[in-house]
Image: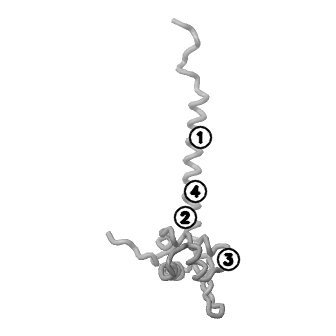
Amino acid sequence: MSRAPATADVFQAIAEPSRRRLLDLIAGQERSVTDLVDQLGVVQPLVSKHLRVLREVGVVRVRDDGRRRLYRLDADALRPVHDWLGNVESLWAERFGRMESMLSELVNQPEGGSDGDVG
């Protein structure tokens, strides 16, 4: 089975750990490629490749500042991920709630019906 290209959607794009690290770095402020290369400790072509993928799915925006290109996060493009995670979080919260109820019942159950008498 062939894999979908990284630019197919935001989920594919952020599946790569290096891209998530890039998003972490630009989430707080705009950064240049040079700054990102320094922060990540990888070569410039690799950073540029990851930024291109993130731009193509709309998660990253770029603006020219003289000779530099500054990259920033466009959090609105992460909305599908946020919505999906919200659904998953609800599912897990429900499951953990049921597990907590079951454990509480087990803890509060009398021990094997014994009344303490020795036979």
Foreground mark, 3 or 1? 3
Q: Quadrant of residue 55?
A: bottom right
How many residues crowd around disc 1 within 10 Å: few (fewer than 14), some, or many (20 or more)? Answer: few
Label 4 sits on residue: 89
* Distance of label 3 from label 2 (alpha carbons): 26 Å
Q: Residue furthest top?
A: 119
**For the point 32% across and 69% down, which residue is it?**
1
Which residue lies at the image location 67% right of the left edge and 77% below the top edge?
A: 29
Nearer to me, 54 or 108: 54
- Mark 2 is on which residue type? Trp
Helix, strand or loop for disc 2: helix
Residue 75: tell me if it is visible. no
Q: Which residue is mark 2?
A: 84
Residue 62 lies, with reference to residue 40, above or below; the image says: below
**Amino acid tagged 4:** Glu
Pick the front one: 108 or 70: 70
| Residue drawn where x is 56% and y is 60% of the image | 87
Viewer-nearest of discs 4 and 3: 3
Element class at badge 4: helix
Count of picture labels: 4
| Residue sitting at x 54%, y 58% | 88
The amino acid type found where label 1 is placed reads: Glu
